[in-house]
Image (spheres, rainbow, N blue to C red):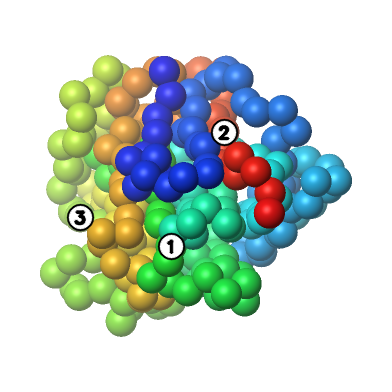
């Protein structure tokens, strides 16, 4: 089982997948050494994988590109004609460090405007399972307070129900003043701030923590003593031009 997004399936000339743990990946797949930064790398056919630092990959070549996640957001982005594609690793630190704005700047520098982009956000930890502290929220608010209305901040004081029937029980709160963070909503606010409209975005409802054991979750591993695991989210052009 793997996951695909209709917003990308509609584009001729690309293929993509939000994989599960252990799924086969395309040959010669390129990915970076991810460090929760705002750095964007343009992949070529010769760059070595897993060594160059960065948290977003952009390419015009036919070499498939990927990000590696185990709770963080994987974002796969394509121009409407499939000429340029990108894979983005969206942890909260990378999002705060401007990874979305930076990758959109790289598209713009290559003549791809915001209205031409299509964005698929893959499986990630959802607010039903992402407990954070007040200090965490204060850190984000200091950086992005004007980004969202106070009534619609990307966190809640009550633990939300899972979007999908859980196969694994969501975690219990560990403190009385816990907050529950919506990483996908945070990314969507950043996309909106850059000019991306809702109709250009598709968001998976799969929670890496509770939806299925075939998806890796860093937090679930810590809570339940599971072996370290991760999944690839990849996109590739079927031909270079």
Q: Nearer the viewer, residue 6 or 163?
A: 6
- At x 35%, y 21%, the residue is 212
Is residue 188 left or right of 164 when viewed as pictured?
Answer: right
Q: Counting other residues with Cα less than 10 Å from the Cα at mark 1, is it few (<14), some (14-19), or many (20 or more)?
A: many
| Spatial separation of the CA atoms under disc 3 and disc 2 | 29 Å
Is residue 213 left or right of 176 when viewed as pictured?
Answer: right
Dot label at residue 156: 3
Q: Is residue 202 above or below residue 19?
A: below
User: Residue 197 sits in which quadrant?
Assistant: bottom left
x and y, in percent, of residue 36 in the image = 60, 55
Residue picked out by circle 2: 232
Q: Nearer the viewer, residue 54 or 150?
A: 54
Q: Nearer the viewer, mark 3 or mark 2?
A: 2
Is residue 185 left or right of 222 when viewed as pictured?
Answer: left
Residue picked out by circle 1: 117
| Spatial separation of the CA atoms under disc 3 and disc 1 | 30 Å
**Are the two marked residues, 3 and 1, in contact with CB atoms closer than 8 angstroms?**
no
x and y, in percent, of residue 31 in the image = 69, 43
**Are the two marked residues, 3 and 2, in contact with CB atoms closer than 8 angstroms?**
no
């Amino acid at each position: 089982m793997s996951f695909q997004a209709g917003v990308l399936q509609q584009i001729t000339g690309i293929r993509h997948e939000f994989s599960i743990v252990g799924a086969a990946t395309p040959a010669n797949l390129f990915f970076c050494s991810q460090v929760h930064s705002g750095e964007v790398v343009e992949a070529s056919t010769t760059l070595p994988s897993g060594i160059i630092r960065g948290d977003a990959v952009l390419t015009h070549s036919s070499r498939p590109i990927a990000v590696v996640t185990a709770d963080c957001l994987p974002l796969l982005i394509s121009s409407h004609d499939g000429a340029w594609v990108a894979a983005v690793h969206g942890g909260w630190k990378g999002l705060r460090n401007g990874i979305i704005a930076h990758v959109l700047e790289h598209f713009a520098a290559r003549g791809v405007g915001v209205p031409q982009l299509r964005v698929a956000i893959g499986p990630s930890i959802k607010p039903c399972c992402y407990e954070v502290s007040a200090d965490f929220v204060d850190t984000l608010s200091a950086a992005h307070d004007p980004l969202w209305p106070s009534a619609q901040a990307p966190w809640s004081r009550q633990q939300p129900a899972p979007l999908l029937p859980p196969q694994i029980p969501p975690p219990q709160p560990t403190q009385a003043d816990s907050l529950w963070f919506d990483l996908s909503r945070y990314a969507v606010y950043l996309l909106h701030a850059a000019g991306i409209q809702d109709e250009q975005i598709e968001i998976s409802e799969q929670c890496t923590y509770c939806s299925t054991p075939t998806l890796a979750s860093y937090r679930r591993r810590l809570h339940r003593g599971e072996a370290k695991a991760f999944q690839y989210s990849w996109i590739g052009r079927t031909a270079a031009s």
